[in-house]
Amino acid sequence: MIKNMKHSRTNTVYQVMAMPKSPMSPHTAESTLHVSALDALVNVNSLFSGVVFIGLAFSSSTISLVASSTDDPCTPSSNTARRVVLFEVLAFAAFLLSSLIAQGLKLQLALIGAKKVVPNALVPINERFIRFGMAVTALCTAIGTVFLTLSIVFLIELRLGALSCPTSAWSKGAAIPLATSVAVGVMVFLSNVLYSFYA
């Protein structure tokens, strides 16, 4: 009888060890994907915010590399320096708004996960609102990137001359590749982020 008890205990131990781990629920996997996408947005916003701070720190000491005569068509207008600061501030505001919304959405996703475990412990949360907030977060990041690009273009005009100048090969050579690469990068980034949001 003792041998039978030991044998049954051994079989029970083997059965427990052989039990497969429960797979991750679809909701948990979806929430993990959404949180990863929001973390990527926050990281991008932090990087660009640092770029904006550096630009604001050095924009006041910008030295033009072209003629400073007002009659020279390559001399940028007096409002160009103001546009640099304006678009840098707007870019920072967009990145900050995007990061704050993303952090709030991460909290809402955590609450949704807790609501699945304890259904009666929390108030209902609209998941459509979560998806809308994710789209707004990605859009704010894209708008901030556009504002940052415009500020760099105006900074190029201050340093290398106005883009309307007949001999503005240096300005166009710097501004056109910048605008093209940023446009392609924003489209690829937004398409991947939105796909991860609605996957």
Image (spheres, rainbow, N blue to C red):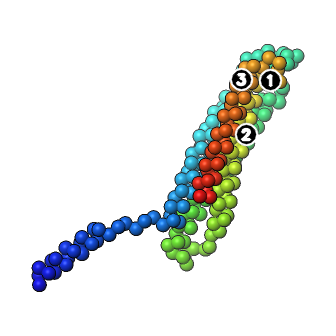
Q: Is residue 189 above or below residue 177?
A: below
Q: Residue at x 59, y 63 (%)?
A: 108
Indicate which label's residue lies in the foreground, 2 or 3: 3
Residue 173's disc number:
3
Q: Say whether residue 39 is visible.
A: yes
Q: Along the polypeptide, which appears first: circle 3 or circle 1?
A: 1
Which one is earlier in the sequence, the residue at label 2 or at label 3?
Answer: 2
Considering the numbered disc 2 on the image, is that residue within a helix, a strand or a loop? helix
Quadrant showing the N terminus: bottom left
Secondary structure beneath dot 1 equals loop
Indicate left or right for 168 with 137 as reference: right
Amino acid type at mark 3: Gly
Q: At 37% across and 66% down in the image, what residue appears?
A: 21
Q: Nearer the viewer, residue 37 or 108?
A: 37
Residue 188 spot, x, y in % from top left: 63, 43
Q: Mark 2 = which residue? A: 147
Residue density around tag 3, few if under 14, some if 14–19, many if 20 or more, within 10 Å: few
Residue 144: which disc? none
Name the side, left or right, on which 52 lies relative to 11. right
The percent position of residue 27, horizontal first and vertical second, equals 53, 66
How far apart are the alpha carbons under marks 1 and 2? 18 Å
Vertical placement of residue 129 versus 1, above or below: above
User: Is residue 10 shown above or below 2?
Assistant: above
Q: CA distance from mark 3 to mark 1?
A: 12 Å
Q: Nearer the viewer, residue 6 or 160?
A: 6
Tag 1: amino acid: Ala
For image coordinates 29% across by 68% down, the residue present is: 18
Looking at the rendered structure, the number of numbered marks drawn on it comes to: 3
